[in-house]
Image (cartoon, coloured by chain):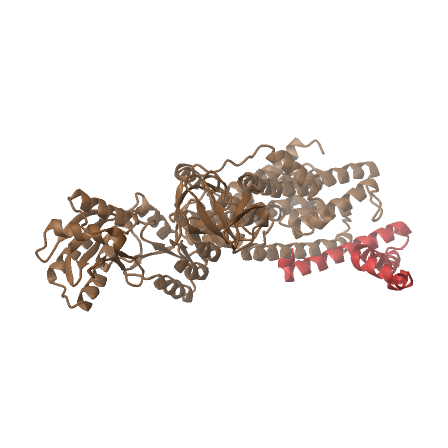
Chain colours: A red, B brown
């Protein structure tokens, strides 16, 4: 019984394994973190015309556009993967 | 030549492909392809997919990405319409692909119906038999198959002679004789039925690796990989998409500067109108349809690359017998020499052919018997000498030491000389006479004495000359290979209209001629069925093996003809060219379409910049212009699905002529058609 418990991965390790399996939530998390930097810049650039929500939404749209551009570059250089 | 007509007239009865429910299934599959994990494989349509999601968001909240000047409700309506049109653009592209895949799946289902899990009689090492499921059989094991039973897996006949019904695979209702030791008749396919006698078969494929299993996987598209041309075109389309994405993404500051602010939905509409969605949406459907057309022709391609290679072929290497001439050469006349009588020659010719089971051999025996010849020995005591490509003769050794041979005149001359005999000008005269008639002369000798020449009549297939003319117009060079002498080969070559020929060819010559052509940068196609053809089939860019051929030939080739008709290589070249032409034509059309879309959307975005005069179509309003361009963009995809699936009508023209023709029809047509269509849609939609 003791050995079995020792063989079980720790909670942290289990979370790491889960993250390895599910990359999308991790990317989404990083994406939103990145937006924490982009959205204030958008808000600052547009002044009072944009609400806070609009700035964050536009920040996400800018990041989506950049992500699409990176994706297109990947297709260009590794077309056989698609 | 019209391929469709040709196919209907030439094809034998083929297994029925069930097409019912094809479109219902395609509609369902088109929705399931909206899964982003599947959508991401098509870069152009994935951008439209993302655009649809974004416009859906601005439909819910028009001010989501910033304040808009217009009434929210009016903006919501426009955004909603744009979302619906973009959704259908993606869905139509998915539908085109699903229809093409559905046709392949229907073909696979008809093949799957021929495969059934049967019980096999496995032969154990002690000679006894054990009943096992066909799925338990492994490569190298032997099975016994009796009359009425289904052959459990692909294999080679070890012993026995039996008639096999291969109609489930080939559609050909006439049974095929299977026997061991021959290149052509010893290979059997799992799923076919023994209809007389019994066979002992050595299994050559593990479960799931059999010929039908591989065919099903290929036709269904499970093993479909992008072909080099598809990859190149995908890169081109992606580059264009990237360029337009950057252009559209950097437009807002410019539009702000000219005091003509624009909304996210309009920017997305512009992006979708600019990127090549038509060809992006139809690209995979064209490729799948190409494979399907080949499968409908009863030919199985191991990859889309092979089908495409057919279209790029520069040189066709063709066997004379069976491809250019009718397969069975028949003995027509006996020409005695050296003072021998016709009866003597007939007797020796009959003796030389007594063990010869080829159609030629049987026809010689029949002709000799018709002339009254009889054998005066017991065939069981004699030794048969089989024909080989190296010796180029066959015959018989009698028990009293007499050697009788028939074969190529040069080979018989050598044989006679080696026995101390001589070849006279009389033999050469008979040989030339037959050769000049386009027939094949076979000399017959007994010991060191030549008795005469057999005239084997060769008939050029009707219509083959016209087909070679078409190939020549397309810039395809044809080379005929034959074991016949130079004179016969030149007569047949001239009659058939081939560009070049190689006489007295050995199997090794095939691979040599392929290498020589490839060294000049040409793509070569050839057919073959024997084990000795396998290296050449593997070396050729397109190797078409006959289904009746050996397992080695089928594995070396990248295409297998289920009807075992070598002439189909010519049809495959036209199908390959049709595939390339279709892809090129639709790409031209798709890119040419952009011009009209610029004129519809650009004046809308920069209306405040005073470029309203660019609205040359006189579209009612900016909103109407955008919707009209997008509706056209969406509708053109389903409108072109039939063309993508059936292919552009093929005409035997040179590459330059085809280019000029396609630029005129699909280039100029692609410029004019959207102007008319967008204007018409603008007049119809009630969006002022």
Q: Position of residue B348 (x, y in %)?
A: 18, 53
Q: Position of residue B270 (x, y in %)?
A: 69, 47
Q: Position of residue B557 (x, y in %)?
A: 46, 56
- Closer to us: B31 or B586: B31
- Closer to us: B247 or B552: B552
Residue B65 versus residue B676 in the image, above or below? below
Residue B280 horizontal side relative to residue B354, left or right: right
- Closer to us: B226 or B91: B226
Q: Position of residue A24 (x, y in %)?
A: 79, 55
Residue B44 horizontal side relative to residue B330, left or right: right
Residue B20 versus residue B392 in the image, above or below? above
* Residue found 49% across the figure and 37% down from its top: B15
Q: Give the quadrant of the C terminus of chain B.
A: top right
Answer with the quarter of the image where residue B517 lies.
bottom left
Residue B589 visible in image? no
Q: Give the quadrant of the N terminus of chain B.
A: top left
Answer with the quarter of the image where residue B115 lies.
top right
Residue B637 horizontal side relative to residue B381, left or right: right
Residue B11 visible in image? yes
Residue B313 versus residue B198 in the image, above or below? below
Q: How many marks?
A: 0
């Amino acid at each position: 019984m003791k050995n079995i418990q020792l063989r079980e991965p720790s909670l942290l390790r289990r979370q790491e394994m889960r993250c390895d399996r599910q990359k999308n939530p991790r990317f989404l998390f990083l994406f939103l973190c990145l937006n924490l930097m982009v959205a204030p810049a958008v808000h600052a650039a547009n002044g009072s015309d944009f609400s806070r929500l609009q700035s964050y939404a536009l920040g996400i749209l800018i990041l989506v556009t950049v992500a699409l551009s990176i994706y297109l570059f990947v297709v260009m250089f590794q077309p056989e993967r698609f | 030549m019209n391929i469709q007509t040709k196919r209907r007239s030439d094809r034998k009865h083929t297994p029925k492909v069930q097409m019912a429910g094809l479109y219902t299934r395609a509609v369902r599959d088109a929705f399931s392809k909206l899964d982003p994990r599947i959508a991401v494989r098509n870069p152009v349509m994935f951008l439209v997919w993302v655009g649809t999601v974004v416009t859906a968001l601005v439909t819910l909240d028009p001010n989501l990405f910033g304040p808009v000047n217009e009434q929210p409700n009016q903006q919501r309506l426009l955004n909603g319409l744009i979302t619906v049109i973009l959704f259908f653009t993606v869905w139509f592209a998915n539908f085109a692909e699903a229809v093409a895949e559905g046709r392949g799946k229907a073909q696979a289902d008809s093949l799957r119906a021929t495969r059934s899990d049967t019980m096999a009689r496995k032969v154990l090492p002690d000679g006894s038999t054990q009943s096992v499921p066909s799925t338990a059989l492994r490569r190298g094991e032997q099975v016994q198959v009796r009359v009425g039973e289904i052959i459990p897996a692909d294999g080679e006949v070890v012993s026995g002679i039996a008639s096999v019904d291969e109609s489930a695979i080939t559609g050909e209702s006439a049974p095929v004789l299977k026997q061991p030791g021959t290149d052509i008749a010893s290979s059997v396919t799992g799923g076919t039925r023994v209809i007389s006698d019994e066979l002992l078969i050595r299994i050559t494929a593990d479960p799931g690796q059999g010929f039908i299993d591989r065919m099903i996987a290929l036709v269904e598209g499970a093993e479909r990989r992008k072909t080099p041309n598809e990859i190149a075109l995908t890169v081109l389309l992606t580059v264009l998409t990237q360029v337009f994405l950057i252009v559209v993404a950097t437009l807002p500051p410019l539009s702000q500067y000219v005091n003509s602010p624009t909304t996210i939905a309009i920017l997305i509409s512009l992006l979708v109108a600019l990127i090549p969605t038509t060809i992006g949406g139809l690209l995979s459907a064209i490729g799948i349809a190409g494979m399907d057309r080949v499968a409908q022709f009863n030919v199985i391609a191991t990859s889309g690359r092979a089908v495409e290679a057919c279209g790029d072929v520069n040189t066709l290497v063709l066997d004379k017998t069976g491809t250019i001439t009718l397969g069975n050469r028949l003995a027509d006349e006996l020409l005695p020499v050296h003072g021998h009588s016709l009866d003597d020659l007939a007797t020796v010719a009959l003796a030389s052919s007594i063990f010869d089971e080829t159609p030629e051999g049987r026809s010689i025996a029949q002709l000799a018997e018709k002339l009254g010849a009889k054998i005066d020995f017991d065939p069981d005591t004699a030794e048969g000498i089989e024909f080989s490509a190296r010796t180029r003769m066959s015959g018989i050794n009698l028990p009293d030491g007499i050697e009788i041979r028939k074969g190529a005149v040069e080979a018989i001359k050598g044989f006679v000389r080696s026995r101390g005999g001589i070849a006279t000008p009389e033999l050469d005269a008979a040989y030339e006479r037959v050769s000049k008639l386009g027939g094949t002369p076979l000399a017959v000798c007994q010991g060191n004495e030549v008795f005469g020449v057999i005239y084997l009549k060769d008939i050029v297939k009707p219509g083959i000359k016209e087909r070679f003319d078409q190939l020549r117009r397309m810039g395809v060079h044809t080379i005929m290979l034959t074991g016949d002498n130079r004179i016969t080969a030149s007569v047949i070559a001239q009659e058939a209209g081939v560009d070049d020929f190689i006489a007295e060819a050995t199997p090794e010559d095939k691979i040599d001629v392929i290498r020589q052509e490839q060294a000049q940068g040409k793509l070569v196609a050839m057919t073959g069925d024997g084990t000795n053809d396998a290296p050449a089939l593997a070396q050729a860019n397109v190797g078409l093996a006959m289904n009746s051929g050996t397992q080695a030939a089928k594995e070396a080739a990248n295409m297998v003809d289920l009807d075992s008709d070598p002439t189909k290589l010519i049809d495959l070249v036209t199908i390959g060219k049709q595939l390339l032409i279709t892809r090129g034509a639709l790409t031209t059309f798709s890119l040419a379409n952009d011009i009209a879309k610029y004129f519809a959307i650009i004046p809308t975005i920069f209306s405040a910049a005073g470029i309203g005069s660019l609205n040359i179509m006189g579209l009612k309003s900016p909103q109407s212009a955008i919707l009209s361009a997008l509706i056209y963009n969406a509708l053109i995809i389903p409108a072109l699905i039939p063309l993508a699936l059936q292919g552009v009508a093929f005409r035997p023209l040179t590459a330059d002529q085809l280019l000029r023709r396609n630029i005129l029809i699909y280039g100029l047509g692609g410029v004019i058609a959207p102007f008319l269509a967008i204007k018409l849609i603008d007049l119809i939609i009630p969006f002022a």
